[in-house]
Image (cartoon, helix red, strand yellow):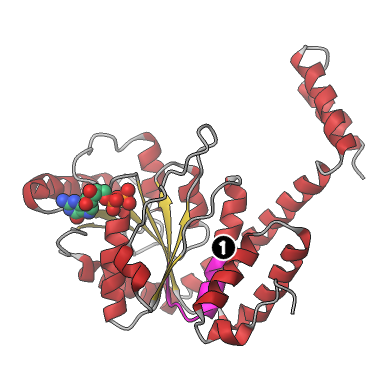
Amino acid sequence: MPSTEIDVDSLRNGDRRTLARAITLTESSRADDRLAAGRLLDDILPFSGDSIRLAVSGTPGVGKSTFIESFGLKAIERGHRLAVLSIDPTSARTGGSILGDKTRMPELSRSDAAFVRPSPSGGHLGGVGRRTREAILVCEAAGHDIVIVETVGVGQSETTASEMTDHFLLLLAPGGGDDLQGIKRGIMELADIVAVNKSDGELLDLANHTVADHRAALHLVRPKWPDLPTEVRAVSARTGSGIVELLDLILERDRILEDRGWKAEQRRRQAVAAFRSDVESGLVRRAFGSREANSRMERLEQAVADGEQSAASAAAAWLSKLD
Ligand code: GDP
């Protein structure tokens, strides 16, 4: 059996090594692995999809890993099987990983009912998005019925996460109520639920104010679903306060989306968008695949930079040589 062959039965029986190997296969960009991954994903398609896909987003230090650990353990107590995947936009400038390499979620990682996948490093965001989308399907086929996609609060990765999940949970720290403009407002529009973490001890008062501020501010943001307003809750990942209630809220909202047919509809849209995005990145890879195309690009870039040719005519000239 070639090393890329994945046994679907052992995957479905929850064999962790098979699950890890299947995800590694989807992360590979080698052409033969892409074909094998495509076959695997086709084979498991009938056994995937039966889950709640939840994006969890927040800036570094807000308490994402503490929260996911606490939330995940509560979900497991209720009989759920959890998977945690990460979109970690490796910093293009430093090459460093934002989520970091420290051991995160140690208890969850030890649980048989959870699968925590360290984030793939490197690659541009589009590639990371594709890999995570495929990993979701693989985890679902392995019987994980809550799949968390964790992401750092830095813009594009939020949008990527929201395009592959059913629900979007934004974690905030107490305070900072005055920066509800700009970037944060964009993220608020993606959120189904805003949870103010660290609502405990000395931070409790400030946290309650933050909850009130965001409830007020959300009136200015277009709700994602009609009749299903964005919820703002106070939680503490450290003490566990509000965590079970948050789990109940997500389960309830998931039931509502399902009953109204919105969950299926959103997933159909997401699958089609994923297909288009894969085709587009494949076309780009192919177009830039040859040395000749690249050197023509360099020559034209030079001409544009030197003001000898307009960007429009250089682009038209480059494109006209593609078959
Ligand atoms: P991440 O970078 O978003 O994954 O954040 P971490 O989960 O690593 O947490 C960052 C810091 O905040 C750590 O020192 C945690 O102990 C602390 N922290 C996380 N959740 C809570 C909470 O609910 N209350 C308090 N007081 N501290 C918390």
Q: Report x, y in % for residue 16.
A: 50, 77
Q: Report x, y in % for residue 241.
A: 15, 64
* Point 41% across, 72% down: residue: 257
Q: Quadrant of the N terminus?
A: bottom right
* Point 75% across, 16% down: residue: 305
Q: Report x, y in % for residue 28.
A: 66, 59
Residue 282 is left or right of residue 225, and the answer is: right
> Which is more toward the observer, 182 or 246?
246
* Point 74% across, 58% down: residue: 30
Callout 1: few (<14), some (14-19), or many (20+) C-alpha neighbours within 10 Å? Answer: many
Residue under circle 1?
Answer: 133
Tag count: 1
Residue 197 in view, yes or no: no
Q: Main secondary structure of the magenta part?
A: helix
> Which is more toward the observer, 274 or 7?
7
* Point 7% across, 51% down: residue: 201
Q: Which residues are magenta?
A: 133-147
Residue 177 is left or right of residue 154, and the answer is: left
Q: Where 310 sits versus 280, above or below? A: above
Q: Report x, y in % for residue 130.
A: 61, 58
Q: Where 315 sits versus 234, above or below? A: above
Rendered image quadrant of residue 185: top left
Q: Quadrant of the C terminus?
A: top right
Q: Amino acid at mark 1?
A: Arg
Is residue 85 magenta-colored? no
> Which is more toward the observer, 285 or 276?
285
Q: Mark 1 CB in 8 Å range of ligand 1?
A: no
Q: Which type of secondary structure does the marked residue at label 1 adopt?
A: helix
Q: Where 318 sits versus 12, above or below? A: above
Residue 153 in view, yes or no: yes
